[in-house]
Amino acid sequence: MKKSILTTLLYAVLYFLCMGIGVLLGNLLDQTGNMFYAPAFTALVGGSVYMILIAKVPRFGAITTIGLVISLFFLGTKHGAGTFLPGIICGLLADGVASLGRYKDQTKNFLSFVIFAFSTSGPILVMWIAPKAYMATLLARGKSQEYIDRIMVAPNPSTILLFIASVVIGALVGALLGQALSKKLAQKI
């Protein structure tokens, strides 16, 4: 039990690092400074971490823990009220879906990761659901109005569809890479 807790915490840190890489890749693609593509790139990079984690710790709670780490990050960095909710909600839902297949069913694990990929979408969702509150949070964090005007993304249907599609595609490709890497590691062990 202690080993699975330590393994889960290690993979939570690794997934958090994948978030950092996802933000960097998103900024390379879109240099406005918003985090629009960060969830998609986080899913692309983090799929391997996720799939290896559920192979190593196939029990309820591991995925939820990573969701909680993401939530705590958004709370701790004062990204605004509500940005922490997707981490908790998506973590629990993803854990539930993977547990339906006892963490062995590839289809349920893929679906689980697609759900989990939205755990990092808190800032984007709050920007769309409560734009005035989001702007006030940014101002309180010392961001300039010019910066805020540059990073705001309007929630029109095509933008929302692009966001959802990018996260789903990033998650599916990340999950495929993760499955392949997990199988290779299992064969070596």
Image: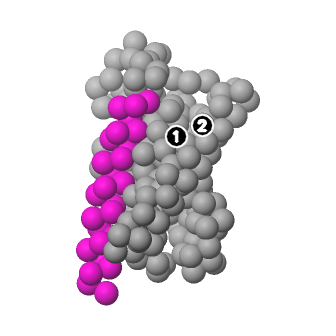
Q: Can you see residue 127?
A: yes
Residue 102 among magenta residues: no
Relative to 27, 99 lies left or right: right
- In this figure, which residue is indicated by the disc labeled 1? 40
Residue at (63, 78) in percent of width and height: 100
Q: Give the range drawn in magenta.
A: 1-26
Q: Position of residue 181 (x, y in %)?
A: 43, 58
Residue 75 marker: none
Q: Where residue 15 appears, x then y in whole percent?
A: 36, 54
Report the residue at 57% width, 80% height from top. Answer: 102
Amino acid, disc 1: Ala
Cβ atoms at labels 2 and 1 below 8 Å apart: yes
* Local SS, label 1: helix
Q: Is residue 19 magenta?
A: yes
What residue is drawn where x is 49% and y is 58%? 180
Q: Is residue 50 visible?
A: no
Is 35 situated left or right of 93 in this image? left
* Residue 152 picture location, percent across and down: 51, 23
Q: Pick the quarter of the image with the C terminus.
A: bottom left
Q: What residue is drawn where x is 53% and y is 70%?
A: 95
Question: In the depicted view, which residue is nearer to us: 123 or 133?
Answer: 123
Q: Mark 2 points at which residue?
A: 166
Check the image and name the residue furthest to the front: 188
Q: 34 or 178, which lies in front? A: 178
| Lateral position of residue 108 relative to residue 180, left or right | right
The amino acid beneath tag 2 is Ser
Quadrant of the image occupied by residue 113: bottom right
Q: Which of marks 2 and 1 is nearer the N terminus?
A: 1
